[in-house]
Amino acid sequence: MTQRFWGRDDRGQALVELALVLTILLTLLLGTVEFGRIGHAYLTVLHASREGARVGALGYEDKDITARVRAAAASIPDEELSIQVLPDKGQRFIGEHIEVSVSHDVHLVVPFFSGILPDPFPVIGRTTMRIE
């Protein structure tokens, strides 16, 4: 039997401390996962826009640029990608610039963060290269 001090009853203290600490730890863990998902999506669309701009800078058609972007962003479903190529094919000349913009909306999983961040969170990768 444990010895108790006068008038001191600390039977629920550990449970209260666990509840306080666990709330903070779970928030940090879920925040790390959510920001990791957003970071992954950002790096993916940025890489895809670079790949598309490189293909466009070599003089390929829009369908080839779009196919390269979709291949580079294979971890994102095709219907969730938005691809924009500027200028149009008829206005592209050697020495001018081509811009490929790829966007994707990341749907947040943790409900707590949808109050802080917009849901869905827009992620945009934009690359400009000189046409060769």
Image (tube, rainbow, N blue to C red):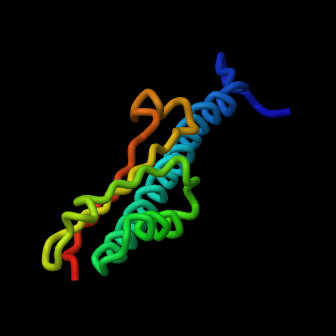
Question: Observer-nearest residue: 37 or 66?
Answer: 66
Q: Is residue 103 above or below residue 70?
A: above
Q: Residue at x 21, y 77 (%)?
A: 131
Q: Is residue 9 left or right of residue 89?
A: right
Percent position of residue 61, x then y: 37, 70
**Height in image: 96 above or below 4?**
below
Examine the image and state in which quarter residue 39 appears: bottom left
Instruction: Report which quarter residue 7 is drawn in.
Output: top right
State the residue at coordinates (44%, 27%). 115
- The quadrant of the picture occupied by the N terminus is top right
* Residue 53 located left or right of residue 29: left
Q: Is residue 127 left or right of residue 62?
A: left
Residue sitting farthest toward the left: 95
Left or right of 128? Residue 96 is left
Q: What residue lies at 45% left-to-right and 33% top-to-bottom?
A: 119
Q: Is residue 77 above or below residue 6?
A: below
